[in-house]
Amino acid sequence: MSSDHETLLSVTDLAVDFRQGEKVTHAVNGVSFEVKRGETLALVGESGSGKSVTALSILKLLPYPAAHHPSGSVIFKGEELLDSDESDLRRVRGNDITMIFQEPMTSLNPLHTIERQIGEILDVHQGMGETQARERTLELLAKVGIRDAESRLGAYPHQLSGGQRQRVMIAMALANNPELLIADEPTTALDVTVQAQILELLRDLQKEFGMAIVLITHDLGIVRNVSDHVCVMQQGKIVEAGPTGALFAKPKDAYTKMLLEAEPKGQPPQADATAPVVVESTDLKVWFPIKRGFFRRTVGHVKACNHVSVTVRAGQTLGVVGESGSGKTTLGLALLRLISSEGQIVYMGDRIDSMTEKDMRPLRRDMQVVFQDPYGSLSPRMSIRQIVEEGLLIQQPELSYDQRTERIATVLEEVAVPAAAMDRYPHEFSGGQRQRIAIARAMVLEPKFVMLDEPTSALDMSVQAQIVDLLRKLQKDHELAYLFISHDLKVVRALANDVVVMRNGVVVEQGPARQIFDEPETDYTRALLAAAFDLKTDHSAEISQ
């Protein structure tokens, strides 16, 4: 056990209950851990395990009085925080302990400039004047790697990339030189390359300032690289804890072993160059006009897709990878003829690029899409039956009610959702189950081509692996052609026969998946692989260009 002067934060027997009327939910139960000065403690576990609730309890940021603590102690530098009044907590929050959140776009005020948001912290906590605050803001922005910081002072959050917004959040958290930084899934919403930069930045800043960090994540790859100690949480309890190296080398709890083994595994189907071509494009272009001035004249174009040629075969998967804004989704939408494009698009031997919407309607049955966020893509007002049935009502109106019911039950069972649950609503299901329902909605029409747009990125690691296995089985059973869009190269490696690497609307590299993963030809592809698979490669310079 460490001596008192080494222990910065001590959490003992923490419990958190939420009351809603007569109903009481036990979110956290008997959690205990210590954080020493200068070290990183990771709280890991799947969604609903109690990680974020535990972290928010440290600063009493939960929605009280609905939330309350039946037991527990949170001692920071010898001071009990759970019993502290609001004025004492205000002194600790933002000064001694700060927090950065998962989605910077929702954490930053969209109506205020970057300078005002950082300056407000310096004014409230340190009483700095405008000139002094500006100097300190520029210093902080430079420290977190915002290039040409002075030109960014007047920018609003929507004018920055995801990585830049997260850097601004880190700058705000560091403004008062905190002793403890709580980082709640700080990289989940970011591309793998930007993730690598942000984690490297946090490590460097920790060394410079001697901060302690409590890192909340479900990504064990991140934990292995940045944390000193790990606490594994399940259903509100810590099921295993210990030094990172020892826990990864010899996990004892079955749940920890399951998390460590949850990475998508297996091989894509055997590549078959003779399989029928389902969809192909030649010299595909999607340019969005940039209009300015009173008369809205076109002064340029955003070249979202520029001269892209791809081929997708029956029973095969084409993986499309790249960072946000690289043109991956635009390519998929163009192939489905959901946005306007130039260039040749052929479906099952017939050109469809000049077809009208009326001509395309019969083909919609054969060309389906599964989106990234299952909760956002499923109507909360419709039952599962109505959601899956909708396509049948439009595309096969001749089916009777009983025939539709039979088809819906069959497809739900095929994606491992009980057919008896078809009268329930999306909010009654977990994230993984909702994604299975979204897949069922696409599969019920028995399509030939499915565009999968980041279908696993919003899911826990173990659920990702299950969805990958499901997609592989469906492809084998129905000879499906997949266009699989993702920035998660581990998932792509498990599914794709061929890979297209995109950057700024153009294809920088394409070929068989094995060749792309084993012998990448371009620096950009090597940078993506290094960030995804923790290779000892300096990728920060390449991806920041």
Image: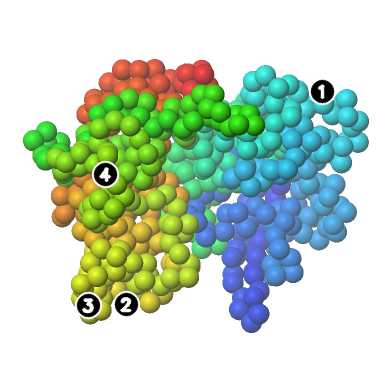
Mark closest to the chain's N terminus, 3 or 2:
3
State how far apart marks 1 and 4 are (Cα): 58 Å
Image coords of residue 525 (percent x, y):
37, 23
Kindly give the residue lying farthest to the bottom in the view shown.
Answer: 22
Query: Do the residues under discs 4 and 3 have CB atoms within 8 angstroms?
Result: no
The amino acid at mark 4 is: Met
Residue for badge 4: 355
Residue 77 circle label? none
Query: Do the residues under discs 1 and 2 have CB atoms within 8 angstroms?
Result: no
Q: Is residue 542 left or right of residue 213?
A: left
Mark closest to the chain's N terminus, 1 or 4:
1
Residue 20 vertical position relative to residue 438 in the rendered view, above or below: below
State how far apart marks 4 and 3 are (Cα): 31 Å
Q: Residues within 10 Å of mark 2 (few under 14, many from 20)?
A: few
Mark closest to the chain's N terminus, 3 or 1:
1
Q: Secondary structure at mark 1?
A: helix
State how far apart marks 3 and 2 are (Cα): 19 Å
Residue for badge 2: 420
**In front: label 3 or label 1:** 3
Image coords of residue 421 (percent x, y):
35, 75
**Quadrant of the drawing holding the N terminus:** top right
Residue for badge 3: 400
Residue at horizontal 31%, vertical 17%?
521
Residue for badge 1: 135
Mark closest to the chain's N terminus, 1 or 2:
1
The amino acid at mark 2 is: Ala
The amino acid at mark 3 is: Ser
State how far apart marks 2 and 4 are (Cα): 41 Å
State how far apart marks 1 and 2 are (Cα): 63 Å
